[in-house]
Amino acid sequence: VSGTALLTGTAPELGAPTRTADGFTFEVTNYDATSTYAASATTGSVTVSGSTVTVTGLLPGADSTVTVTASKAGYTDASAATTGTALLAGVAPVFDAPTRTPDGFTFSLTNLDAAASYAVTATSGSVSLTGSTVTVTGLLPGAGSTVTVTMSRTGYTDAAASQSSTALDAGITA
């Protein structure tokens, strides 16, 4: 009986994980289209599509270790592992009651996070955020607007909340 020993397989080289809301993704940086890749995860579900490995189904802040195995005819299987973590859950902005003005309204964020950045949009009028105060201007008397405030912070999912109000009716002063 004679035969040839298998050649030594090349272990996958795994890129740094990119966190997502329910898991993470990473690349097999030395991807070889002539190899077959399989992956297993300690937590969550894992898929391989080309050079991209995606883990889903994790709770906020949870981690998982993924082992990727490369197989190729005539070679031994070779594996590598990496650990990634899902993003933490963002905290939605909380507001106090709006105060109507002749051309809009104001309200405050009551849970402002100094480590976060905030974006504001309004369905009507102009909106600005100064410190913790949101100001809407440019509304006609009695006209309404809905303001959405989105909190962004590194390592967290974005979180948003909305507040609606109207400008004072014509002839009414604050």
Image: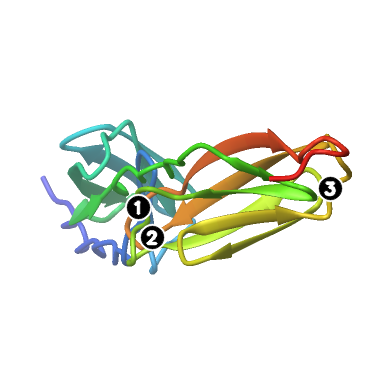
Residue 62 horizontal/vertical position (percent): 20, 42
Q: Residue type at mark 2?
A: Arg
- Percent across and percent down for residue 56 are 36, 36
Circle 3: residue type: Leu
Query: Residue at horizontal 35%, vertical 44%?
Result: 91
Q: Secondary structure at mark 1?
A: loop
The kind of residue on which mark 1 rests is Tyr
Q: What is the CA distance from the residue labelled 2 to the residue labelled 3? A: 31 Å
Depicted 94 relative to depicted 72: above or below: above
Q: Marks 2 and 1, Cα distance to the nearest angstrom?
A: 6 Å
Q: Look at the numbered disc 3 and give the secondary structure of its residue.
A: loop
Mark 2 closeness class: few <14, some 14–19, many ≥20 residues within 10 Å: some
For disc 1, the marked residue is 156
Q: Nearer the viewer, mark 1 or mark 3?
A: 3
Label 1 vs 3, first from the N-terminus: 3
Quadrant in which the C terminus appears: top right
Asked if the residue at tag 1 contacts the one at tag 2, i.e. Cβ–Cβ closer than 8 Å, the answer is yes
3D distance between C-alphas at marks 1 and 3: 34 Å
Front-most of 172 and 110? Answer: 172
* Residue 134 relative to residue 32: left or right: right
Which is nearer the N-term, disc 2 or disc 3? Answer: 3
Mark 1, residues whose alpha carbon is within 10 Å: few (<14), some, or many (≥20)?
many
The answer to whether residue 51 shows anywhere in this view is no
| Quarter of the rendering occupied by the N terminus | top left
Residue furthest to the left in view is 1
Residue position for label 2 = 153
Left or right of 56, for residue 58: left
Residue toward you, 128 or 153: 128
Number of numbered tags placed on the structure image: 3
